Image: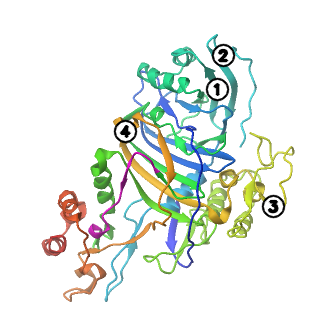
Amino acid sequence: MKLRLFALLALAAPAATLVSPREAIACGGCFAPPTETTVVNAHRMVLSVSPVQSVLWDQIQYSGDPSEFAWVLPVKRGAILEVGSDAWFETLDAATSVRITAPSSSCGQSGGGCGFVGVGASSDSVEAGGFGNEQVTVLHRGTVGPYETFTLATETPGALNTWLEANGYGVDASTQPVIDAYVEESFDFIAIRLLPGKDVKEMKPVRVVTPGANPALPLRMVAAGTGANVAITLFTISEARLAAEGFAAAAVPIDLLAWDFASQESNYGVLREKTLAAADDGRAFLTPYARQGSLFSSVSSPAAPFGVRYTTSGSTAPVDTIAAAFAQQGLANGETGETQDAACAVRFAEIANEVRAVANPCPAGVPLSDPSCGKVAADQIDARDLACGALDDLAIAMVGLHPKDVWLTRLEANLPRAALDTDLALSPAPQEPVDNWLRARVSVHADVLCGAAIPVLDGDRPSRTRGQDTLVGMTLGALALAAAIARRGARRLAARLA
């Protein structure tokens, strides 16, 4: 089920704070038997960082049809593996995708459009060595959602690859130096594979909860199973806007953003692809969205001055915030369990301006619904108030954070395999919002609005900053939009971009 967004009515929110030291947490490599041709073509990840914990959600998207899917994640000692919800990724992706509106016109309708669309583990413990050997210790064996999982530890180079091969994981021998490097850095490993009878094309998200603030991802492991390039979409949730260290900061040239009134499409997708490829040979991240307070507060933007509201595939009633949309999507997906708690969206709105931190009253690895959970202090927010039955991703993401100060940031990349040779470290970026609602500057086929009359359009006089002329030359030949227009529209577009 997909989330749809509409601009209706809302307000905005400002400012910033900081995050602390880093240490890589978890991000996995995908393996399949040698007879399979599985290729990982995308990772969608969410990273929540607070002084108390770091939580990584990871969802692999791949081509191929493996009879056995295997996934190996390097983790720090004490990490706990859980399963996440599809609604979590669906909501964050839809709410932060770039939305393009047409230039305003003095006649006809100026349409808008999308230029780019873009449970605690239950287990039976086994004794160390039951599935291991004298060099690899099985710390934990269990099932999480549709997965069988093993948590493994070793201090011996090469031992983990041997264990994985012996236990039916089709590990490429080329991964051994990478795995050995993580062994040297005192990582443990979680090995995951689908249980028999499970066959899905988009993997159920997993989340790894690690104690402490660790704003880093071991990208070296992501290289396993990928093709020439891998698309990465990373959402960060923290008390600062975060950016990728050591990677170029790409920016789509908005002055080249064109809208075709005939097809009701923009050229944003082409501009984005060319921008990412050109920036430092593809070693670049784009930030199409960054907002403080947007999880729990309504937002507006210059391109959507009447504000943003969200509706899901399971409801026609729009809601004002991303948190409320998440609850609505979870209900539509049937991911709230037996508890049909539609009122949780209302509770979310009550904490938008809270300066108290969210606390988890449950022991590590225990679901929020467990009777063993205790109470939080009076100056804390109970994480259970942010759960909708079994739908608890938002609650887990907020532990240790102050709702009013939280930034939601979206980072995108299409990294060449060579760029996965180093881990990804995140650090505070300039604490400025980035709006995902954009108005096109250039008009194509504008005559469909007014016939023979010449319409007055916002995009008729685009401003261009120095240095963008070279990017114009790079992108013009690739603009599918410009290639498809009629001769009159082509002359007008060329004149504006000259």
Between marks 2 and 4, how big is the CA–CA gap?
Answer: 35 Å
Indicate yes or no whether the magenta region holds residue 397.
no
How many numbered marks are there? 4
Q: Secondary structure at mark 3?
A: loop
Residue 2 visible in this rendered orientation of the protein: no
Residue type at mark 2: give it. Answer: Phe
Residue type at mark 3: give it. Answer: Asp
**Viewer-side residue, 49 vs 444:** 49
Q: Which residue is mark 2?
A: 131
Earlier sequence position, callout 2 versus callout 1:
2
Question: Mark 3 or 1, which is nearer the eye?
Answer: 3
Residue type at mark 1: give it. Answer: Phe
Residues in magenta? Answer: 244-257
Numbered circle sitting on residue 419: 4
Mark 2 in CB contact with mark 1 (< 8 angstroms): yes
Question: Mark 2 or 4, which is nearer the eye?
Answer: 4
| Quarter of the rendering occupied by the C terminus | bottom left
Earlier sequence position, callout 3 versus callout 4:
3
Question: Mark 1 or 4, which is nearer the eye?
Answer: 4
Q: Secondary structure at mark 2?
A: loop
Mark 2 in CB contact with mark 3 (< 8 angstroms): no
**Viewer-side residue, 136 vs 476:** 136
- Could you classify mark 2 by the number of other residues whose Cα lies within 10 Å: few (under 14), some (14-19), or many (20 or more)? some
Numbered circle sitting on residue 455: none
Question: In x, y percent, where is residue 388?
Answer: 73, 57
Question: Mark 2 or 3, which is nearer the eye?
Answer: 3
- Could you classify mark 4 by the number of other residues whose Cα lies within 10 Å: few (under 14), some (14-19), or many (20 or more)? some
Q: Which residue is mark 3?
A: 379
Residue 223 visible in this rendered orientation of the protein: yes
Q: Secondary structure at mark 4?
A: helix
Q: Which residue is mark 1?
A: 150
